[in-house]
Image (cartoon, rainbow, N blue to C red):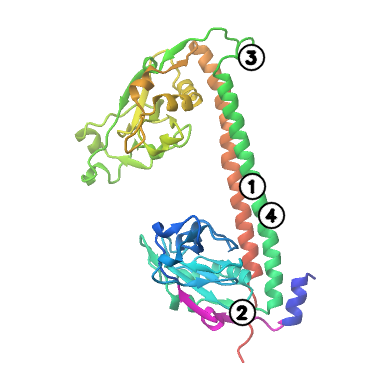
Amino acid sequence: MSKLDELIRELCPDGVEYKTLGEIAVDIYRGAGITRDQVTVDGTPCVRYGEIYTTYGVWFDKCVSHTDEAKLTSKKYFEYGDVLFAITGESVDDIAKCCAYIGHEKCLAGGDIVVLKHNQDPKYLSYVLATTDARQQKSKGKVKSKVVHSSVPAIREIKVPIPPIEIQREIVRILDDYTENIVELQNQLTAEITARQKQYEFYRDKLLTFDVLRGGTIDFDREILCRIADLGKWSGGKTPSMAEKKYWESGTIPWVSSKDVKQPILSDTIDHITNAAVDEASMTVYPAGSVAIVTRSGILRHTFPVTYIPFETTVNQDIKILVTKEGISSRYVSHALQAYGESIRRTTKKQGGTVDSLDFQKVLAYKIPVPPLDVQNRIVNVLDNFEKICSDLNIGLPAEIEARQKQYEYYRDKLLTFKEVAAT
């Protein structure tokens, strides 16, 4: 019998009391607004409601944000043991996500946060308030919309099991250990994905310098430099009028924008247009096997996005698309542009301007090595096989992480489900 079983048998053999947060609250109140421009590098630690969704887990001991409290007209504090709820969000399922503060500084709670003071184990409360049952209570009656709200009265009504403090602490110990193992696994799997990707990029870049080809498995001793302009026909795109619903509603024709160009091979686009848009807005449909690059986007500050498109598509004005000429493999070109991407970005990026962009004439003048077609195809075969290994890892390892997370959530919910003591 486990220690937890022994504690339950000893301390609550007839069941556990379920209580509302209103019943266990020493105090419960809303925070006070802290705007984004009031966040500073130094000052009083603070939490803004969005950070509960994006930054903090079940518990935290240090705030990532600070503010100058002398400039705040209204102040609401929280301290060790308090549980914070975010009562504004974008998802019904996640509304009123909470976290426990176990640090030792006095901190400020921003607007759209509810602070719960209590005499329970703070981590226990945060764990039990993350269970499926608690989340269903939080979302009950909420309507899906762009912004979802909860309230202090709604938080007060959430009902959870409140076992003796010794049991709470043992459950926290078990879940902390389990959580630590999950995090360690996630870090290991993420590191594996990153390492394989770096290995692929290193091998690709080495292969496309051609030094490793001379006398190697792909024997090639002539390097032919070719201007990017001479790889085929380059074109740009445009955006059909957003005001014309018939151009967009139920569209099936892919329309590539900069937000789509995130993978070496494009699987689909976020937006699609209709045949009416193609006909009336004079949109060009490019053939499958084209290569697209982004020439205008904030991402160009640090990345040169390139993608191979295995289906017919249209593109917007921030994209340049290449249909390669005879004797040029579009897959080879996509690999080569990725390999030389950082150099292309650095040498062709425009200075100034409100949006980062490339001087496309300089891009066209840039030269990359283009060997005979048979050598291109052999290089593509090697790199595609390596890329598939990385892709399989990118699919398989996140799936493993997700499976472990679901296993953890199931175990947590079982651990935090008690027989309710009979009413007297």
Q: Quadrant of residue 251?
A: top left
Amino acid identity at mark 3: Thr
Q: CA distance from mark 4 to mark 2?
A: 29 Å
Q: Report the residue marked by disc 3.
A: 217
Crowding near pointer 1: few (<14 within 10 Å), some, many (20+)?
few
Amino acid identity at mark 4: Asn
Where residue 181 is drawn, which disc sits there? 4
Crowding near pointer 3: few (<14 within 10 Å), some, many (20+)?
few
Q: CA distance from mark 3 to mark 2?
A: 70 Å
Q: Could you tell me which secondary element the residue under label 4 belongs to?
A: helix
Q: Report the residue marked by disc 2.
A: 119
Q: Report the residue marked by disc 1.
A: 187
Amino acid identity at mark 2: Asn
Residue 14 colored in magenta in the image? yes
Along the line of sight, the residue nearer the viewer: 341 or 78: 78
Q: Nearer the viewer, mark 4 or mark 2?
A: 2
